[in-house]
Image (cartoon, grey):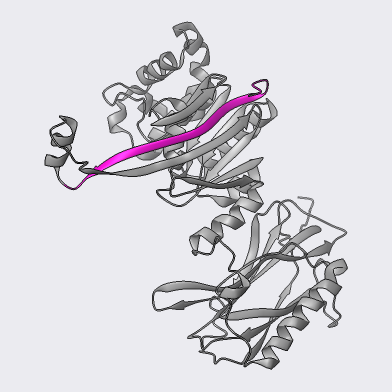
Amino acid sequence: MENRNLAIHVEGVNKVYKLYNRNRDRVLESLGLSRKKRSTDHYALKDVSMDIYQGETVGIIGTNGSGKSTILKIITGVLTQTSGTVEVNGRISALLELGAGFNMEYNGIENIYLNGTMIGFSEKEIEEKLQDILDFADIGEYIYQPVKTYSSGMFVRLAFAVAINIDPEILIVDEALSVGDVFFQAKCYRKFEEFKKKGKTILFVSHDLSAISKYCDRAILLNQGVKLGEGSPKEMIDAYKQVLVGQYEVPKPSDAPNLSQDEDIREALEKRKEQQKKNRQAGVNPETLEYGTHQAEIIDYYVTDRNGVQTTAILKGDVFTMHMKVAVLEDLPAPIFALSIKNIKGVEITGTNTMFEKTFLDSVKKGEVKEITFTQKMQLQGGDYLISLGVTGYEGDEFKVYHRLYDVMNITVVSDKDTVGYFDMESKVEVKNV
């Protein structure tokens, strides 16, 4: 293994917990009084490997119970793996969960010294950083009170202030930022940016997919203790969305409905595929992520400008229309037709659907073809954006994805005046003499 630039190396890690139906079985097995095995093995992590390089910011995403927190605890030494190897090169500061590493009877100052000492700093080094920690936490006189009297917000402010200001080489954060208020979260993410510029390594778990997309160089997707993949944040976020609806494995053609009786629909589907090939030079993505149950199919899509001319370039401030045609392959109770727009980093900027807009709440019959148009004013800043389309719905309480096309095409917004951020709020600005 090449260690030169590796901050964290994880190879073949398993974490197994024994589950017992009765406490009596646990005692018998631990004392060796039972000839048969009385437990079942539960893999919190199964053969997980990953390399995190110095200076990278890496996010770990996955559903609850996927093993995200477990792998972080193993990396930081809070838990011991059942098997496999973990190597860490650099001083770690970790913010794993509310209260970890704090003595609830100590006041804030005492806990700062306690945490700093545990990480390996001398009392003099902690004293030199104390004011920076106090300024970042900004909890006032509460710093002299026992932390057991703190609110969850004050607690996380102090914990993060300690973790971020002791100058670690590797920072590990597990979902803790979701506790703080919006101003504190903004301050934390600014600190992330500072860390990135200094070449520090950051590993964090978050359900905030926008934060993963914005701050991470790579993302790792876990599900039920297994690493499903790693890659760009955009790729892994799209895969994660498939996991959420049970569609991670794209259905094979043989899984799709039999269309032999529906020649018009079959012809429309073939036409759509041919049209995609022709339009590849006109903004259509040849590597579109596509999945769903195929109970309905998006068979055509394109953008028109205010004059009804098909285009992929929209003038900022102009009205434009996204067109989508959907073939219904089975009777459906109330399909939802959706549009979303992301930036090129994968951050979802805006979107809507027929349920939000209350424009279509009806059932549909097999063989119908629906044409949906989304008309809106372009207020995004100049640049390139990605369009995603979908047909989903609820069958009872179950959410179903019939067909999704992620990043199916791009549009370019042409602008001669941009403002700060994603949107232009069309401000009217005046300057007067007083």
Residue 11's x, y, as percent? 53, 32
What type of secondary structure mainly makes up the magenta span? strand
Considering only vertical position in the picture, is 316 above or below 254? above
**Pick the front one: 86 or 214:** 86
Which residue lies at the image location 67% right of the left edge and 26% below the top edge?
Answer: 199
Residue 376 visible? yes
Instruction: Please say whether residue 16 is one of the residues in the magenta stretch.
Output: yes
**Pick the front one: 204 or 279:** 279
Magenta segment boundaries in residue numbering: 2-21
Q: Quadrant of the N terminus?
A: top right
Residue 125's x, y, as percent? 51, 9
Considering only vertical position in the picture, is 258 above or below 339? below
Farthest front residue in view: 35
Which residue lies at the image location 63% right of the left edge and 68% below the top edge?
Answer: 351
In this rendering, position of residue 411 left or right of residue 52: right
Considering only vertical position in the picture, is 209 above or below 364? above
Instruction: Please say whether residue 214 is one of the residues in the magenta stretch.
Output: no
In this rendering, position of residue 268 left or right of residue 173: right
Residue 286's x, y, as percent? 78, 64
Which residue lies at the image location 46% right of the left edge and 72% below the top edge?
Answer: 399
Residue 380 visible? no
